[in-house]
């Protein structure tokens, strides 16, 4: 559970107003445990976070949905350790507009041929994906800090205040159709609970 502590600490230090709004599920288990919750902030409609762990696995997923009306991207992070030698780190500006290539000057550009991700269709030109081991996760912490700080500045510049979540419907539907998480969750927590998690929590706007 502590593998991603430096990433999470930076997230909550940067967004001190990101308050816990409620726990959606807490599924302890011998083989795998899960906790999911919602947080809200001054310019954030919701930050929906998922933690999954056992002795070898440690996964932290979070998508920050900004309040609406300013045409801002979401910020998504998938920090996934399946076992110590198989770790995938992903974070990106995920824009709710379809077929729109969002980009930030000065940040790394996405490498081609990345499975499940398509820059220009809700993923940005700056999509960051790296594979590493559990001992190397903090090698990418400074890049994560740079991305997230830029995102914080976007929010503070635009000061979004709208609550119309309909602008996220196509985004959530696309993510739900794309994301392989349903099969992974089903194998760990059963089909009924995993489908509810996907449809009613992870991508509830879709």
Image (tube, rainbow, N blue to C red):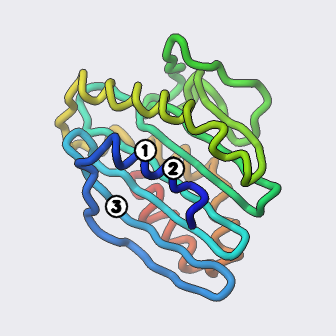
Residue at image x 65%, y 44%?
89
Q: CA distance from mark 2 to mark 3?
A: 20 Å
The picture places residue 57, in percent across and down from the top left corner, at 69, 67
Q: Is residue 105 left or right of residue 31?
A: left
Q: Is mark 2 in CB contact (under 8 Å) with mark 1?
A: yes
The residue sitting at the top extreme is 105
How dense is the environment of label 1, judged by Cα within 10 Å: few (below 14), some, or many (20 and up)?
some
Residue at image x 44%, y 68%?
36
Q: For the residue labelled by badge 1, is the local secondary structure a helix, a strand or a loop?
A: helix
Q: Which mark is residue 10?
A: 1
**In the rendered view of the protein, which quadrant contains the N terminus?**
bottom right
61 is higher (above) or lower (below) than 57: above
The residue sitting at the bottom extreme is 30
Q: Is mark 2 in CB contact (under 8 Å) with mark 3?
A: no
55 is higher (above) or lower (below) than 166: below
Q: Nearer the viewer, residue 183 or 152?
A: 152
The picture places residue 105, in percent across and down from the top left corner, at 51, 11
| Pointer 3 residue | 38
Q: Nearer the viewer, residue 152 or 163?
A: 152
How dense is the environment of label 2, judged by Cα within 10 Å: few (below 14), some, or many (20 and up)?
few
Of discs 1 and 3, which sits in the foreground?
1
Residue at image x 23%, y 48%?
17
Residue at image x 56%, y 63%?
2
Q: Is residue 168 left or right of residue 88?
A: left
Quadrant housing residue 90: top right
Q: Nearer the viewer, residue 117 or 204?
A: 117
Q: For the residue labelled by badge 3, is the local secondary structure a helix, a strand or a loop?
A: strand
| Pointer 2 residue | 6
Q: For the residue labelled by badge 2, is the local secondary structure a helix, a strand or a loop?
A: helix
The picture places residue 24, in percent across and down from the top left corner, at 37, 72
Of discs 2 and 3, which sits in the foreground?
2
């Amino acid at each position: 559970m502590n593998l991603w502590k430096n990433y999470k600490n930076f997230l909550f230090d940067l967004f001190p107003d990101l308050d816990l709004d409620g726990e959606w599920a807490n599924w302890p288990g011998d083989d795998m445990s899960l906790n999911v919750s919602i947080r809200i902030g001054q310019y954030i409609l919701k930050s929906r976070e998922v933690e999954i762990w056992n002795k070898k696995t440690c996964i932290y997923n979070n998508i920050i949905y900004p309040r609406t009306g300013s045409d801002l991207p979401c910020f998504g992070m998938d920090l996934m350790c399946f076992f110590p030698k198989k770790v995938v780190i992903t974070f990106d500006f995920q824009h709710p507009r379809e077929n729109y290539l969002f980009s930030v000057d000065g940040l790394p550009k996405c490498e081609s041929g990345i499975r499940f991700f398509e820059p220009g269709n809700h993923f940005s030109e700056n999509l960051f994906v790296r594979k590493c081991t559990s001992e190397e996760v903090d090698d990418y912490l400074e890049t994560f800090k740079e991305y997230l700080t830029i995102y914080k500045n976007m929010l503070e510049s635009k000061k979004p205040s709208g609550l119309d979540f309909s602008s996220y419907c196509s985004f959530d539907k696309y993510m739900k159709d794309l994301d392989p998480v349903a099969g992974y969750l089903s194998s760990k927590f059963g089909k009924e609970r995993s489908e509810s998690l996907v449809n009613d929590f992870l991508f509830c706007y879709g």
